[in-house]
Amino acid sequence: MNIERIAILGTGSMGSAILAGLLAAGFDPARVSVSTKSEASARKLNDQYAVTAHSLETSDDANRLAVAGADVVLVGVKPAYVASTLAEVADALGPDALVISVAAGITNATMEAAVKARVRVIRSMPNTPAIVGRAVTGLAKGSRASEADLAVATQLFQTVGRVVVVDESQIDALSTISGSGPAYVFYFIEQLTKAAVDHGFSAEQAATLVNDTFLGAAELVAATGKAPADLRRQVTSPNGTTERAIAVFDQANLADVFKQATDAALARARELAAAN
């Protein structure tokens, strides 16, 4: 990976997941600096990963110290703080720094306005399975970023999963599918687990039945390369139990529910972008 030094601003779940993935891929921790809220968190990161950690609790310049000398800066703070954080560190960024944000609803134009004119930016949308190295990350480059910059960002996020490069006009829609998608899956797991308990299984039994069924089904899709609809039909014997259950889903117009849900998420993503 052609990165000499990387800074990560914010070490919440996503920043921490990317940090762990980067180091697991063999990146030298001596070339990583991070900023984090508390002194306790900074000590933990230093002890666990041997990276240089700066605490906002003990230094007002923690973000600026973190980005000094970095050629890649990953912005992992909450969306509401992205623009102000970038404005804070703008004059501390190196002339060739590449800035990558993981925040929902923050456009490349917003980031470009907050940093020096020459600084390139890329907008990313990873999802929480990054924590276990199974993320799907969408990438969209800003107006000043090059294909080489996009290649660097791709390598970075491949340490925690797979990468899809899209035009920025698609990134909000991508966030409603892969970005929010894990929550939809968790919701289905939650509801099917409740149904299992209602049918008399213990909580432990229900968790095994449901969690491993979802895991196995997903692995079957990946292993066979078959369309999910084809795999569903293989399980759905004519006049059988599965067919009866699928009929209930069809009567509830589940396909339309998915469309309404993702449309609602997309509308909210656009509201966030407009507000920032």
Image: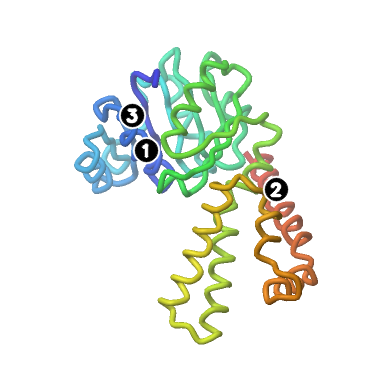
Q: CA distance from mark 1 to mark 2?
A: 29 Å
- Report helix, strand or loop for mark 1: helix
Q: In the rendered view of the protein, which quadrant contains the C terminus?
A: top right
Q: In the rendered view of the protein, which quadrant contains the N terminus?
A: top left
Q: Quadrant of residue 29?
A: top left
Within-10-Å neighbours for mark 3: few <14, some 14–19, many 20+: many
Total labels: the figure holds 3
Q: Is residue 220 above or below residue 16?
A: below
Between label 1 and label 3, give the one nearer the viewer: 1
Q: Is residue 39 left or right of residue 147?
A: left
CB atoms of marks 1 and 2 within 8 Å: no
Between label 2 and label 3, give the one nearer the viewer: 2
Q: CA distance from mark 2 to mark 3?
A: 33 Å
**Looking at the picture, how far across and down is residue 117, in whole percent?**
55, 15
N-terminal label among 2 and 3: 3
Out of 210 and 70, give the one closest to the viewer: 210
Please tell me the numbered disc located at residue 266.
2
Residue located 34% across and 41% down the image: 36
Q: Amino acid at mark 2?
A: Leu
**Looking at the picture, how far across and down is residue 134, in whole percent?**
46, 45
Out of 65 and 203, give the one closest to the viewer: 203
Between label 1 and label 2, give the one nearer the viewer: 1
Q: Is residue 264 left or right of residue 23?
A: right
**Looking at the picture, how far across and down is residue 203, in whole percent?**
44, 79
Q: CA distance from mark 1 to mark 3?
A: 19 Å
Q: Is residue 85 above or below residue 204?
A: above
Residue indicated by mark 1: 21
Residue indicated by mark 3: 66
N-terminal label among 1 and 2: 1
Out of 49 and 108, give the one closest to the viewer: 49
